[in-house]
Every structure is written in C-alpha cells, then in structure tokens.
Amino acid sequence: MRRILKVLVILVGLIVLGVGAALGYLFLGLPKAEPPAALKVAATPEQVARGDYLANHVTVCLDCHSGHDKTRYASPVVDGTQGQGGETFGHADGFPGEIHIPNITPAALAEWSDGEVMRAMTSGISRDGHPLFPLMPYPVYAELSQGDAEALVAYLRTLPARGTVAPPSTLDFPLSLIVRTIPSPATLRPDTPQPGSPDYGRYMATIAGCQFCHTPEEKGKALPGMDFAGGHDFGSVKSANITPDELTGIGGWTKEAFITRFRTYAAGTPATADGDNNTVMPWTLFVGMKDEDLGAIYDYLRTVKPVRHAVEKWPAKKEKLAG
C-alpha cells in the first residue's frame, strides 16, 4: 500500500511539474518575440503617399481601426474617426471573448518606436510583449515588402491624433493561452514586386486580404484545397467564391466586369434597416484601388485552382443587395 501511495505521489508530482513547465513556457517563452527592429522610418512625401494608398485602399488598415456608419451597406468609415479604434467584437458577434480595436493614431502610438509598430503589424506582438488576437491580420501583413511596411508606419504617424482609449481585450479559456502560440517573427520581402511582373498580382491579392477573407475555415484553420473558394463565416454573412470556377466563382467575369464591380459604390452605399442583408467587404475603401492593381489581382485569381463551391452569402435571408 505504501509503495502504491509513493508511486501516486511521484506521479502527481511529475504532473504538477509538467503542468508548471508548460505554463512557464506559455507565459515566459511565448509568444516568440524578437526585439523590435532599430528602425527609423524616413517618412518622405512619397512614402507617406504610398502608405495612405495602402492603408485606405489595399490593406485597408483603417477599416478596422475607425468608426463606421452601420446604417449603410458595407458600414462605411465615418469621416473624422480614421484610426481612432474603439469598436468591439464580442460574444454577440460570435467571437471567443471581447476584442476591443485599439487606437492607432499618434495619440496612442506616441511612445511606440517605428520598430515596435512594425513588429505589432507584421508579427502580432504588442509593445509590451503580449500577443495580438489574429483578427488583426498580421499573417497577411507579414507578406508585405519592407518598403510598403515602412510606408504604412510613416502614414500612421500623419493621422490626426484622436484620444480614444480601448480597454484591454479578453479571450475565453483556452484561447487565452493558445493565442500565445500564434505570433512568430516576420521576414518581410526586400522589395515590392514591379507592376506587370508575374508576382505582382499575387502580392496585391495577398496584402489586400483576399485569401484571408475568401477561404473558409474550421476551428481557425483554413480548409485545405479551398483557397479563395468563399464561405468564410463572418456571422451574418459569408464571403463569396472568387476562384475561376465558371458556375460558382468568377470564371465567367471579364477583367472589365471585375474592376467595374469595385466601382459600384463610388458615390456611396445605400441605407439599410435592421435585418437587411449587409456585408463586411469594405467596398467604400476598395473603391479607391487603382485599375492596374485591381486588374493584377484579377489576373492572379484567374491562375488559382477553380473550386466548385456554391456559397449562400446570407444564410436564411433573401439576397436583397449584391454582395
């Protein structure tokens, strides 16, 4: 009997040590963080202009980090709120916690170095070392070129300072631990691909989040073989299939039709009432993307694997507006 008790005590002790070691690694060893780069962005007029274009019309950073008019289709950004953050995605929206979108204007980033801003944007690690929930698409921004990432940092420094302060985000267990395993150091591209080059369309589609938003997921993981096939669930709406499948994707679209679709809401979006179909696609920001960039994305999408996948964009609703 004593021998059995001794064995049990040893086993319990080993389990406690193992759990302690695992928790110690989670909290002390993760997230995998490299020191922020000793970076000082030059912030030339050309660099700021490039960052303005990217943040507002390609990477659409200011879609998440601004206030929105939710009475209109596609919830356009409210002028005067750019960068202030303040919105919350919580349990009511299907999120595993309460994720508060932070202020990214100079009022909030004044103490941040340029390297710390870039590390948060591309590696998912905040200034104090805590991991960012990947609603912030840092795996997408990790694909940026060094020059484009610096341009975004330069542009954010020019935003009007706004005093909004978001409370800390909270995540449900066990995601509160799992999220620490997600960030990893980013290795940015040394150069932005040249327009017209074979890699340019893929680059633009990637940093615009096309694959991120248009690939269905299961338990936070992209479904294999379903790249760009639509069905990513955003709660009240699912993303469209944008593979070149003729029946369920955009295989029958011409380049002109594709570009024209992005110009649909150039004059604004219609009002919507409670219960109307809506979309998370930031049409009123993407409307400002250049024709050559939209055309490059179209050309790239024509090269991806066509997937026969019919998506009901507004489940259990009548499709009242084109999405």
Image: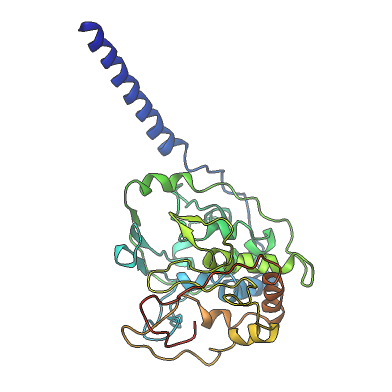
Residue at the outermost left position: 1
Q: Is residue 237 left or right of residue 188?
A: left
Nearer to us in this view, 230 or 46: 230
State the colouring used for the structure image: rainbow
Residue at 45% across, 54% down: 132
Quarter residue 198 falls in: bottom right
Q: Quadrant of the N terminus?
A: top left
Q: Give the percent coordinates (x, y) of residue 162.
A: 42, 72
Q: Give the percent coordinates (x, y) of residue 203.
A: 68, 65
Quarter residue 133 falls in: bottom left
On the question of residue 110 being in view, the answer is no
Q: Is residue 97 left or right of residue 126?
A: left
On the question of residue 208 being in view, the answer is yes
Nearer to us in this view, 13 or 7: 7
Residue at 41% across, 45% down: 178
In the image, is residue 173 above or below residue 302?
above
In the image, is residue 56 above or below residue 147?
below
Q: How many marks?
A: 0
Q: Is residue 50 left or right of residue 182?
A: right
Nearer to us in this view, 297 or 290: 297
Q: Give the percent coordinates (x, y) of residue 224.
A: 56, 55
In the image, is residue 145 above or below residue 47?
above
Q: Give the percent coordinates (x, y) of residue 189.
A: 70, 56
In the image, is residue 226 above or below residue 125?
below
